Amino acid sequence: MNSPTSSDETVPLVPMGSVILGLLTFSMMDVVMKSLSIELGAYNAILWRVLASLAIVSILHFARRPKMPSADARKVHLQRGVIVVFMSYLFFWGLARVPLAEAIALSFIAPIIALYLAAVFLNETIRRNAIWASVLGFSGVVIIAWGRARGGFDEEAFLGIGAILLSAVLYAGNLVIQRRQALLADPIEISFSQNLIVGCSFLLLAPFFAVVPDVQYAPEIGAAAILSIASAIFIAWGYRRAEAQTLINLEYSAFIWAAIFGWVFFKEPITAFTIFGTVLIVAGCILASRPDRKVEHIETTTI
């Protein structure tokens, strides 16, 4: 009989701490990227940040004399890299148009969407809890959007909300394969491959959209690059050492950082609508992660 303190039931505090630190640095990167997206546009902000990240992480990657990744690892790297291309552009384009805390709150709907993606691509049965979770999550999104509308109709803000929700759909796919990628490759390889794929993809459009930024933006681009690498490494390290179901709810801590950073750096107030909508979305995600309650079968006898 296993003791209550067996390793299977030990809370993975170190991996959890690593993921929380990764989410903190990711939120710090969001602050820098929001500023760059406003000044340079989402495309150029992402292009130059990714190229800077690739230059830095390439040194770390090749200094170890790495072996060629396996065929499975290359496939997963490509899948996630392509997802990140569209996911990042949509998110940062939307982030330039809505408050930081609202953007993060809307992205929390991704775990609920992931359940439906699993049903479509993995033929999993959609559970009753997942349906109720969808109702809560959708209600939270409507409340946040309604709160935005009460301040006066702003077409740019609503387009930003739409972009972030589309990004959340892609982020759901990202969550599905994140754990598998972490088991196939180490954090440095993951960061290198992701920046390589995203960078090459964005360079294809460089002749049409790229603009060399003024030197004054170099510190921000460098900071965003370093923060993105640190975030990817911390999160990948944590996911390699603990199950996704243990770590995924830590994503909600990002709202705390977003609310603080949005207020400090952009003077963005946190409305009651954003808080209430976030509570509903988070409640839906937690409900979706719980198994349905089994109904006890009671045998009856006929007299």
Image: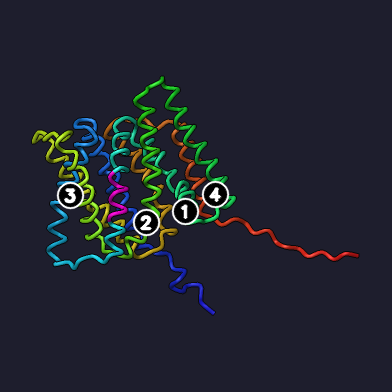
- Other residues around mark 2 within 10 Å, as few (<14) / some (14–19) / many (≥20): some
Q: Is residue 150 magenta?
A: no
Count of numbered badges drawn on the protein: 4
Q: Which residues are magenta?
A: 78-85
Q: Which sits in the foreground, 256 or 96?
A: 96
Precedes in sequence: disc 4 or disc 1: 1
Q: CA distance from mark 2 to mark 3?
A: 22 Å
Residue 165 position in % (x across, y down): 40, 38
Q: Amino acid at mark 4?
A: Ala
Q: Amino acid at mark 1?
A: Ala
Residue at label 3?
53
Q: Are marks 4 and 2 in contact (CB under 8 Å)?
A: no
Q: CA distance from mark 3 to mark 1?
A: 32 Å
Precedes in sequence: disc 2 or disc 1: 1
Q: CA distance from mark 4 to mark 1?
A: 12 Å
Q: Which sits in the foreground, 1 or 248?
A: 248
Task: State which mark lies toward you, 2 or 3.
Answer: 2
**Direction bottom: furthest residue:** 1
Residue at label 4?
130
Q: Amino acid at mark 3?
A: Ser
Precedes in sequence: disc 2 or disc 3: 3
Task: State which mark lies toward you, 4 or 1.
Answer: 1
Q: Is residue 82 magenta?
A: yes
* Disc ID at residue 177: 2
Quarter of the figure with residue 248 = bottom left
In the rendered image, the quadrant that contains the N terminus is bottom right
Instruction: Tell me if I can see residue 263 in this picture.
Output: no
